Image (cartoon, rainbow, N blue to C red):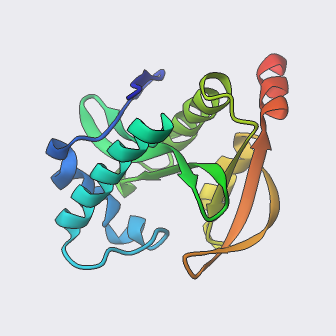
């Protein structure tokens, strides 16, 4: 399981000991409104997600990381293969106290580099609800372009993506 350090953050796989802090972030009302809601006990749902991420790390070599700032869990982000689309998405979700500070962009940029340079992916996409303008702004900042509307788990969403060749060109342009 890969661990990365960015300019300000540590990105590492979540572990069981992170479950309570992760549940407080993932199921915070201002975060959950953009994501799939939890069924039942939120702490147990967080533990289930952490187990799912660990399984993905072992099987695919990528999954969402916990995003840590000064040893404090502030969100999750990274890569996630979605079988429904047969492709890998870049994703992020931050506690509201840490939104708007560039942490999502920093995390997603590291995830894109990992996906294209280490995993040799040809395309990475992101989806969000049509009214989630802050996430769409992050997508555009990263160079992802709008492609289409999709439905995922019954939720209307917009699809943005970025090809490896375009990512590499952007990296070369500085």
User: How many numbered circles does the render carry?
Assistant: 0
Task: State whether residue 119 appears in this view.
Answer: yes
Task: State the residue at coordinates (69%, 35%).
Answer: 121
Indicate the quadrant where residue 151 lies.
bottom right
Q: Is residue 75 above or below residue 38?
A: above
Above or below 134: residue 122: above
Residue 9 appears at what percent x and percent y?
Answer: 40, 28
Residue 58: which quarter of the image?
A: top left
In the image, residue 63 lies at what x, y percent?
A: 45, 43
In this view of the protein, which residue sits in the foreground, 62 or 30? 62
Quarter holding the C terminus is top right
Q: Residue at x 64, y 61 (%)?
A: 127
The structure residue drawn at horizontal position 60% and vertical position 67%, both measured from the top left corner, is 132
Left-right relation of 103 to 150: left
Asked whether 3 or 60 is in front, the reply is 60
Relative to 1, residue 104 above or below: below
Q: Position of residue 166 (x, y in %)?
A: 84, 33
Q: Is residue 23 left or right of residue 155?
A: left
């Amino acid at each position: 399981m890969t661990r990365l350090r960015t300019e300000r953050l540590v990105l590492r796989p979540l572990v069981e000991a992170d479950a309570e802090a992760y549940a407080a972030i993932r199921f915070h009302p201002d975060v959950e409104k953009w994501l799939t809601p939890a069924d039942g006990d939120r702490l147990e749902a967080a533990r289930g997600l952490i187990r799912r991420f660990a399984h993905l790390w072992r099987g695919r070599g990528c999954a969402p990381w916990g995003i840590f700032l000064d040893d404090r869990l502030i969100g999750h982000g990274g890569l996630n293969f979605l079988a429904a689309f047969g492709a890998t998405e870049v994703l992020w979700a931050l506690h509201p106290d840490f939104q708007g500070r560039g942490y999502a962009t920093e995390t997603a940029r590291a995830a894109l580099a990992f996906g294209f340079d280490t995993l040799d992916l040809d395309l990475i996409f992101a989806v969000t609800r049509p009214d989630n303008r802050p996430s769409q702004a992050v997508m555009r900042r990263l160079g992802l372009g709008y492609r289409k509307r999709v439905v995922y788990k019954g939720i209307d969403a917009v699809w943005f993506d970025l090809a490896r060749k375009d990512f590499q060109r952007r990296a070369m342009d500085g």
